[in-house]
Image (cartoon, helix red, strand yellow):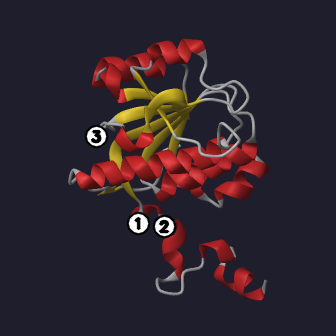
Amino acid sequence: RGLEAYAGRTPADWDFREPLGLALDPGARRVFPGVRAYLEDLRSPFNVGSIFRTADAFGVDELVLSGFVPDPGHPRAQRTALGASSVVAWRRGGLDELAGAAGDLGPDAVFALELRGDPIDSFEFPARGLAVLGSEELGVSPEALALCGRRVSIPMLGAKGSLNVGVAFGVLMDAWRRSLAARGVAPEPRGPALV
């Protein structure tokens, strides 16, 4: 704990190969421009924090939170975000965000992470798009699904039919990042989040 207090960082952010300051340096952050996610009615602050941390790790440009999503400043969200909510751009938005993105980017650029979709391994990720994530209990709402051009699913091999939404988001973002890298799309430097 003495080292933690001295460094001003939690042990989870320590990297003995890079200077400690890089862990939360907003200027060191790189993003894939136009790669965004919409969080619809997630209830758990822990999941919200986890998604922020994952969004930072995988270069998500922006998160859009529906009105029922806990604030990223909630103490439980902060516990799992480990500061990522201060570097990942986010804002509040409604279903009009999905309709607007579909109009701007095309309907196939707005897609839901949901059951009974195209397998993630063969899914054609857009260079710029909006992934929609719903609550663990109810999934993506019918209203939001109607605004999505496609669905993507993570194949399940176990007895359970789904994953925790924070874990599923990590799987999704790793696949999206790999898809972009395979096409030569590189992340770009991004300054501090505008929250």
Residue appearing at x 74%, y 34% in the figure = 43
Q: CA distance from mark 2 to mark 3?
A: 26 Å
Return the mark for residue 28: 1
Determine which residue is flagged by label 2.
25
Asked if the residue at tag 1 contacts the one at tag 2, i.e. Cβ–Cβ closer than 8 Å, the answer is yes
Residue appearing at x 44%, y 47% in the figure = 60
Determine which residue is flagged by label 3.
127
Q: CA distance from mark 2 to mark 1?
A: 5 Å
Between circles 1 and 3, the one closer to the viewer is 3
Q: Secondary structure at mark 3?
A: loop
Q: Position of residue 83 (x, y in %)?
A: 62, 59
Q: Position of residue 187 (x, y in %)?
A: 31, 56
In the image, residue 67 sits, relative to residue 29, either above or below, namely above
In the image, residue 74 sits, relative to residue 24, either above or below, namely above
Q: Amino acid at mark 3?
A: Ala
Q: Nearer the viewer, residue 169 or 162?
A: 162
Can residue 86 be seen here? The reply is no
Quadrant occupied by the N terminus:
bottom right
* Left or right of 82 in this view: 137: right
Q: Earlier in the sequence, mark 1 or mark 3?
A: 1
